[in-house]
Image (cartoon, rainbow, N blue to C red):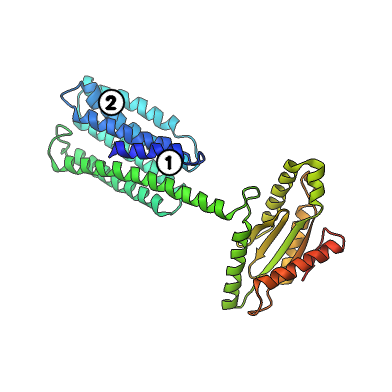
């Protein structure tokens, strides 16, 4: 199972967008767990250095690598300094407990405590930064469950029930090894689900957003407007929409080039978003023309939003631009999106006719 999961994750790493990070770490983790299992099963056939010290460290390293992969996946660095030091120190401890002062029970206790601490750090990190989607919750539940198993094993060691060998057919060893096998499988499945969910989210974003300005594309903003009108007919509180057009934008492109024009559009979109509420929507209607949806907003309030946008684009930034804005507000259940767009477009044309760089209400 480890080998198959590693192959799946490796192919995902090769074919998924490079901004989905951490897949290489997640692919390496099951390989290390597989190596650990092979070494554990070869006890009495291979030297203790391999089947005791290296086997434990491969298992611990696999869990560490998986944790680092989760940090990379969620856009965080770090992790190696702390757990690399733990790996180095624990290697010396396990060699001491294997060759100098052999103690199976103490070795089990220390290793179990280390794994529980690592899984606890991993779980804490995912709880703080991972969100609440199903794949993330699955990984969190798997980690929490295995922490409980590790704590139970640690308590059994303290109670003198550690046994004499990991392959001893006792209840505690059977439960621990069974839980370990299921954890390896479920963590690998969780990684696949997390990466697939991230890919789906990114594809949905690409399908609904303009790649240059990161505002909604025309189809998505029109859909948002229609949904808001449908909601307004149910509850009686309608939106306003604003048509925004950058003044003399063709001259900007002709004078400074299209790269500069693109930078102006990006700056304009960022400034406009900063003037909007979280529930407002900015969409690129076409070229240098944009559409803003303002839910539950009347004409005076929409005009104040327009003035904030004008003010932000006159702050003196090198990419600041002037624009004309046409505002249209909902007039009741009989009003339609086409009618509102027509009024906003007429108001925008009026702003252009009256000298540009101003707002008119239709």
First in sequence: mark 1 or mark 2?
Answer: 2
Question: Can residue 278 be spotted in the picture?
Answer: no
Indicate the position of residue 26 as horizontal and vertical percent values.
39, 38
Indicate the position of residue 272 as horizontal and vertical percent values.
70, 55
Q: How packed is label 2: few (under 14 Cα within 10 Å), some, or many (20 or more)? A: many
Q: Is residue 77 above or below residue 335?
A: above
Q: How packed is label 1: few (under 14 Cα within 10 Å), some, or many (20 or more)? A: many
Q: CA distance from mark 1 to mark 2?
A: 24 Å
Given residues 339 and 140, the one toward you in this image is 339
Q: Is residue 82 above or below residue 228?
A: above
Q: Which residue is mark 1?
A: 70
**Residue 81, numbered label:** none
Q: Which residue is mark 2?
A: 54
Q: Quadrant of residue 236?
A: bottom right
Indicate the position of residue 312 as horizontal and vertical percent values.
75, 53
Given residues 73 and 349, the one toward you in this image is 349
Q: How many marks?
A: 2
- In the picture, which quadrant includes the C terminus? bottom right
Given residues 188 and 315, the one toward you in this image is 188
Indicate the position of residue 30 as horizontal and vertical percent values.
32, 36
């Amino acid at each position: 199972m480890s080998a198959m999961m590693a192959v799946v994750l490796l192919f995902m790493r090769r074919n998924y967008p490079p901004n989905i990070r951490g897949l290489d770490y997640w692919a390496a983790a099951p390989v290390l767990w597989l190596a650990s299992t092979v070494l554990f099963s070869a006890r009495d056939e291979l030297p203790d250095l391999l089947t005791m010290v290296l086997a434990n460290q491969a298992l611990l390293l696999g869990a560490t690598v998986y944790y680092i992969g989760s940090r990379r996946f969620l856009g965080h660095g770090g992790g190696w300094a702390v757990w690399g030091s733990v790996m180095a120190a624990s290697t010396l401890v396990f060699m001491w407990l294997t060759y100098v002062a052999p103690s199976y029970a103490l070795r089990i206790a220390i290793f179990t405590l280390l794994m529980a601490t690592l899984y606890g750090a991993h779980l804490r990190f995912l709880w703080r930064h991972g969100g609440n989607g199903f794949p993330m919750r699955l990984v969190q539940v798997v980690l929490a469950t295995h922490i409980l198993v590790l704590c139970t094993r640690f308590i059994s060691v303290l109670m003198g029930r550690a046994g004499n060998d990991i392959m001893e057919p006792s209840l505690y060893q059977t439960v621990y090894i069974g839980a370990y096998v299921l954890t390896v499988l479920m963590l690998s499945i969780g990684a696949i689900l997390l990466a697939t969910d991230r890919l789906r989210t990114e594809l949905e974003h690409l399908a609904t957003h303009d790649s240059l300005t990161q505002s909604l594309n025309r189809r998505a903003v029109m859909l948002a407007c229609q949904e808001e009108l449908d909601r307004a007919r149910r509850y009686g509180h309608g939106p306003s929409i604003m048509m925004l057009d950058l003044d003399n934008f063709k001259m900007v492109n002709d004078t400074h080039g299209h790269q500069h024009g693109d930078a102006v559009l990006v700056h304009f979109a960022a400034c406009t978003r900063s003037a909007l509420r979280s529930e407002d929507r900015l969409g690129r209607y076409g070229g240098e023309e944009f559409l803003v949806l303002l839910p539950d907003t009347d004409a005076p309030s929409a005009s104040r939003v327009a003035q904030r946008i004008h003010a932000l684009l006159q702050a003196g930034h090198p990419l600041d631009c002037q624009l004309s804005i046409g505002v249209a507000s909902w007039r009741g259940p009989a009003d339609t999106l086409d009618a509102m767009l027509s009024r906003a477009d007429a108001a925008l044309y009026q702003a252009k006719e009256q000298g540009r760089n101003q707002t008119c209400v239709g």
